[in-house]
Amino acid sequence: MKSVLGILNMQEKNDLIRDLTAARAVEALPFAGRYRLLDFSLSSMVNSRITSVGVMLPDWSRSVLDHIRSGKDWDLARRRGGLAYLPASIDRSDSRVGDLKDLYFNLDYVEFGDKKYVLLANASFVYNIDFTNVLKFLQDNSGDIAIVYYTAKEDAAGKNVVLETSTNGIVTDIAEASSVKKDTKVAMGAYLMPVPTFAYIVRSTYERGGTDFLVDGIIRHAGEYKIMGYGHDGYVAHVDSTDAYYKANRDMLNPATWEELFMGSRTIYTRVKDEVPVQYKDTASVKNSLVANGCIIRGEVENSVIFRGVTVGKGAKVKDCILMQRADVQDGALLENVICDKNVIITKNKWLKGAKTYPYIVTKNIMI
């Protein structure tokens, strides 16, 4: 995969998750106790021996820069290749919104490099995939473009791009859908193709008024190319809404899902932060939960994801919750179906309760 240039796309729309993304990109959301969403696509690239990765910076980029830094934790701090940050376009005369604009203004990074292929991956997906197999699949079938997809296990609402493929993997139909039915093939935001194909689609589509690489680019050029669909059989979650974020975090409490994503030969890397182990006090009770380092637990925690440095006080009860870094749940508080962003303080004896399909959200740096 040394012939492949990776590009990490951080242009996920935040319309349905604004409470958690007011000052950060969707892809930078904390996930599963110690990770960020972008860790999964970035780690999958690195594990596939892609040594040059460009990160398309979102408008809110501070949290992304702070997390990735030099790329050392992903072995991307290299003399040749390694990590490159691709800034958002500053063309104020163009009000179009979408990833195509930023891809267009960073085309020189792709075209003047020494790579033969481009892998563009949406960093708001959770998965662990070997992209080496995708490249081999594309080459073996003499394809022009490979789209990675998964097969939906249940009906789901929300915009997605769905595929139909023939028995030999050729994409016979591709379209944007407002909902997904069970057993439908759904694109998972990863596209592999030769550099000239990528550059032509980006340039021609943008100069004709397009905004979205997949919808305006690949779909509208589908008749010009042999597009292959590569099916991924493992776990996939697309975090494009608050409900999807809540559900995906709770999926991590399933031992089989956790083992697939984190315990195999392909490590999911993240920024290393050395902290003391969790302190479980005499009054603590923890069931079916993820609890990260640096936490102090004195109360009850059940079916929850607890990030680094969280404190749960004596007599407090936390059930079906996501508590991000340095949240402080004080004595006697009760939380159920709640998402607390960073540095939240829930004072003594306060009760907060949401619904499983509509969790209560406490935004960053708030005291209740």
Image (tube, rainbow, N blue to C red):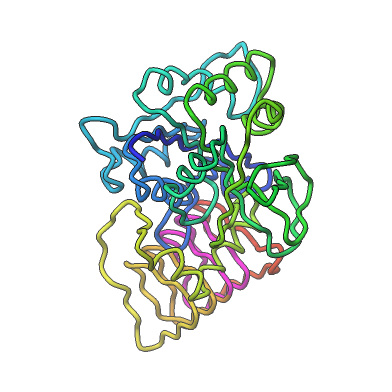
Taking the spot 46% from the left edge, 67% from the top edge, the residue there is 260
Q: The N terminus appears in which quarter of the rendering?
A: top left
Q: Residue furthest left?
A: 79
Between 251 and 354, the residue placed more toward the observer is 251
Is residue 84 placed above or below 330 in the rendered structure? Answer: above
Taking the spot 61% from the left edge, 11% from the top edge, the residue there is 93
What range of the chain is rendered magenta?
320-348
Magenta stretch encompasses residue 308: no
Q: x%, y% of residue 161?
A: 70, 43
Q: x%, y% of residue 190?
A: 54, 42
Q: Residue furthest top?
A: 93
Between 231 and 327, the residue placed more toward the observer is 231
Q: The C terminus appears in which quarter of the rendering?
A: bottom right
Is residue 272 placed above or below 93 in the rendered structure? Answer: below
Q: x%, y% of residue 100?
A: 59, 25
Name the quadrant containing residue 208: top right
Left or right relative to 354: residue 344: left
Name the quadrant containing residue 343: bottom left
Left or right relative to 278: residue 245: right
Q: x%, y% of residue 227?
A: 62, 37
Taking the spot 57% from the left edge, 76% from the top edge, the residue there is 319
Magenta stretch encompasses residue 344: yes
